Structures are given as C-alpha cells and as structure tokens.
Image (cartoon, rainbow, N blue to C red):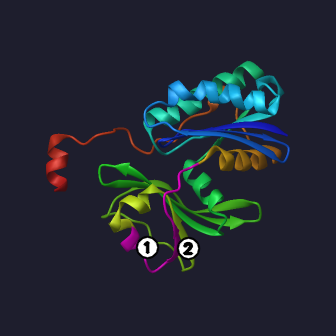
Amino acid sequence: MNLLAIETSTELCSVALLRDDELFVEEAMAENRHSELLAPMVRRIFERARLDARRMDAFGFGQGPGSFTGIRIACGVVQGLAFAAGRPVVPVPSLLALAEQSNETRVIAALDARMGEAYLAAYARNGDDWDEVIAPRLADASVLPPLPGRSWAATGSGFDRHAWLRDAYRASVEMRFEGDLPRAGSVARIAARRFARGGGVAAEQAAPLYLRDKVALTTEERRTKR
C-alpha cells in the first residue's frame, strides 16, 4: 500500500509516506509557515520514495482539533492531491495520532487550545485500532470528563501547559510524555489500517475537526476569566 499523510494541526509541519512497511518522513517546526513549507516537503518525500500522487492508494491527514489554519491547510492540500489522483481520503483525529505514537495501550491526549482551554480525548487500544473512551472535546478547568480506572499515559501540549489538567487526572495517570506533538507518521499508520478495512471518504467530503468556532476571547471574556 502507498499512502501519503499530512499533519499540521500544531507548530510541527509533518509529512509521511507509507510505502508498504517502509515509512518516509519530512518534518520541520513551522510556527506560522506551514503553507510555505508544506508543498516542498511533499515534493521531496515523493522524490525520496520514487513515487507520485497518482501512485498513492489513499491520502490521510490530521483533521484536528488544533490550529484552525493548520488543519485547513492539511485538509486542503490532501483534498487537492486526492481529487487529482482520484483516490479517497482518510481523516485521522490529531489526538488519536498522539495516542498512537505513545506506544501505550491507554492514553489520554490533550493539546493546548489557548484561552485557558485544552482539546482532550482518551483512547484504549483494541487490537490494531483504538476504542474512544473520551471523544475529542474542548475542555477547561471547570468542565472535565472522568477518566475510568488507572494506569493511563498522558501526552500532548495540553498536559505540558496546564497544571489544572495534570492535577485533574493525577490519580489516573501513571506516566506522562512531555513535548510530543502529533506526527504524520502515526497519521499514516492509522489511515492505512482504516483504509485496508474499507475506511475513507471522497476528497470533497473530507473535513477538519474544529471543536470551537473562535480563536480569541473578547475583552469581557478575558475579564471574566481573571
């Protein structure tokens, strides 16, 4: 199977190409330069694998939640490639990609959403896939879903940034990964498994997972949160 995946939901710009069992990766810290860096990275990874878009069986992308601009870029680029090649798209939640790359079996993943909030989800491994224990959601210190049992691993910038998140799940979390961000390699592996089981949508049906509809607080909201 040949599958190209893109993950740009955070400051990491990441592209991966899965050629059967061989994984090619291009990554760079982009901050706000995803649109500048992504196309050259895609070209380089095709050259390294000696393939092109027409040779892909499917395309995957990290659909978010995360940076509004970042996930729109990943979705748009993958849609364009998939539409031109006549291939399906497999959207993969970025929080699930974090869980996948931890190599643990019970993972709670969180990304910093700014404004004192975090994007949060929890997953338990089931064979070669994952069960959703807590569906992706926007959370803050006042609204946090319970996490069943113990022996969980925590990962993502949400736990790095927010003490209230670490404190809330202290009794359930046994270990924590610091400084990790969603990567296209894990998106590619999840997407390939799901595509092999019949997953995937037409290019025009691929959509980001936003979870909220604004990127900044109003003056009154900032005053209320103090």
Q: Check disc 2 and report the residue beneath it.
A: 152
The C terminus appears in which quarter of the rendering? bottom left
Q: Quadrant of residue 166?
A: bottom left
Label 2 crowd bin: few (<14), some (14–19), many (20+), radius 10 Å: many
Label 1 is placed on what type of residue?
Answer: Tyr
Q: Is residue 51 left or right of residue 84?
A: right
Q: Is residue 86 visible?
A: no
**Magenta highlight range:** 166-182
Name the spot of residue 27 as percent of width and height, x first: 60, 40
| Tag 1 secondary structure | loop
| Tag 2 secondary structure | strand
The N terminus appears in which quarter of the rendering? top right
Name which residue lies at 35% across and 62% down.
162
Q: Check disc 1 and report the residue beneath it.
A: 169
Name the spot of residue 89 as percent of width and height, x first: 70, 34
Q: Quadrant of residue 80?
A: top right
Q: Is residue 179 magenta?
A: yes
Q: Quadrant of residue 90?
A: top right
Label 2 is placed on what type of residue?
Answer: Trp
Residues tagged 2 and 1 counted as in contact (Cβ below 8 A): yes
Name which residue lies at 65% across and 62% down.
131
Name which residue lies at 51% across and 31% down.
34
Name the spot of residue 52 as percent of width and height, x first: 79, 25
Q: Is residue 88 visible?
A: yes
